[in-house]
Amino acid sequence: MRPARALIDLHALRHNYLLARARHGGRALAVIKANAYGHGAIACAKALSGVADGFAVAFLDEALSLRAAGIQHPILLLEGVFDTDELDAVMREQLWIVVHHAAQIDMVERTPASQPLHVWLKINTGMNRAGFLPEQAPAAWQRLHDSGRVASCTLMTHFARADEPDVLSTTDQIAVFDDATRHLPGPRSLANSSAVLGWQAAHRDWARPGILLYGADPLPAADNGLRPVMTLQSQVMAVRDIPAGAALGYGGRFVAERATRVGLVAMGYADGYPRTVPDGTPVAVDGHPTCLIGRVSMDMLTIDLTDVPGCGIGSTVELWGAQVPVNRIASAAGTIAYELLCNVKRVRFEYQG
Ligand SMILES: *Cc1c(COP(=O)(O)O)cnc(C)c1O
């Protein structure tokens, strides 16, 4: 069997969730959109079901598959509904919805209420992506209230730059939020992962941690005690010696400066390992640090075994995990850990804990 696999440590997932909720106080929705950032939404929801206050996903279908798997917790749709049919499903399945633009209030008003709705009213406090302008918030709240269909309304916003500890726009966003909601009742929710870890002033009734649950610290300069959940791993399947001056792989990008022992690893960009990383990107072989050499191809990649003579065919290769932080690979690839984790596919998923 091809040895490429993603090991998912569900103990670590629970640890990270509980750490986030303790740091924030109040309650926390575990954000498991995009198949739990590539980790498997149903398995993660089940693993968190004994501890989590609720879950958040992006849209209806993600929530329906959790309900079909028996998850009965509150589930918030972060994009809300796209049409009134979806609103029927929301009522039937007792889902919670974000309302972030006026057409969604129209839908609430038009739909006969079979069940009271739990709404999270999203206010744009400076990210300028989704949400009502601060000055529109009271009127939006009033329309929802007057619709007679809304049982509860939580007030929320989302930060653009909470992962940058020295940038003051987060402080500005908090002030805009407080000002816009001063006369509105209801619970508040501001903090994503980086605000849970880095912005105490954003801690209110509900946190919405995503990436931190998976142990990829959005503020890695501080040691926040998160544990990596995914280990992306494979094995050396063949070994070859190349002389100094030989080129390796597509494009001949890597040219050996010395006689080099090359390990061929069953992992490629079709598995979600990024093609864009340069020579020298870290990997761990049987626990020893070494590096990638040559371009990543679709099904395979190559690593330098010259200085780890004890390693060979069958040696375990960690692409990311406890020894190789996924943040390191993300920065080598010019992206963020979120994107790498979401992209993992084709490998076997094995759950522990
Ligand atoms: C995805 C998302 C989150 C989680 O963000 P992280 O940075 O992964 O913690 C929180 N809130 C909203 C509205 C989101 O869309």
Image (tube, rainbow, N blue to C red):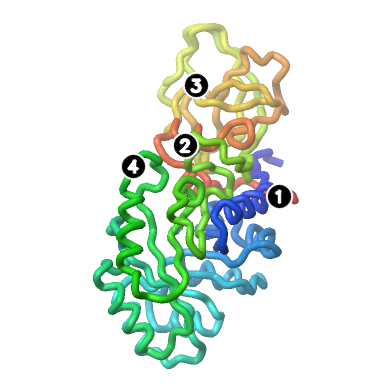
Disc 3 and disc 1: Cα gap in Å? 32 Å
Give amino acid for label 3: Gly
Residue 134, position as x, y percentages in the image: 27, 67
Residue 314, position as x, y percentages in the image: 72, 28
Disc 3 and disc 4: Cα gap in Å? 32 Å
Q: Do the residues labelled 3 and 1 touch (CB within 8 Å)?
A: no
**Counting residues from the N terminus, which is met first, the one under dot 1 or under dot 2?**
1
Q: Do the residues labelled 1 and 2 touch (CB within 8 Å)?
A: no
Instruction: Read off the residue under disc 2.
Output: 330
**Counting residues from the N terminus, which is met first, the one under dot 4 or under dot 2?**
4
Q: Residue at x 68, y 38 (%)?
A: 3
**Counting residues from the N terminus, which is met first, the one under dot 3 or under dot 4?**
4
Instruction: Read off the residue under disc 3.
Output: 280
Describe the element under mark 4 as helix, strand or loop: loop
Instruction: Read off the residue under disc 4.
Output: 167
Q: Nearer the viewer, residue 152 or 43?
A: 152
| Number of callouts | 4
Circle nearer the viewer, 4 or 1: 4
Q: Do the residues labelled 3 and 4 touch (CB within 8 Å)?
A: no
Circle nearer the viewer, 1 or 2: 1
- Picture layout, residue 273 above or below residue 105: above
**The residue at label 1 has a CB less than 8 Å from ligand 1:** no
Left-right relation of 350 to 105: right
Disc 1 and disc 2: Cα gap in Å? 24 Å
Circle nearer the viewer, 3 or 1: 1
Give amino acid for label 4: Val
**How crowded is the residue under tag 3: few (<14 C-alpha within 10 Å), some, or many (20+)?**
some
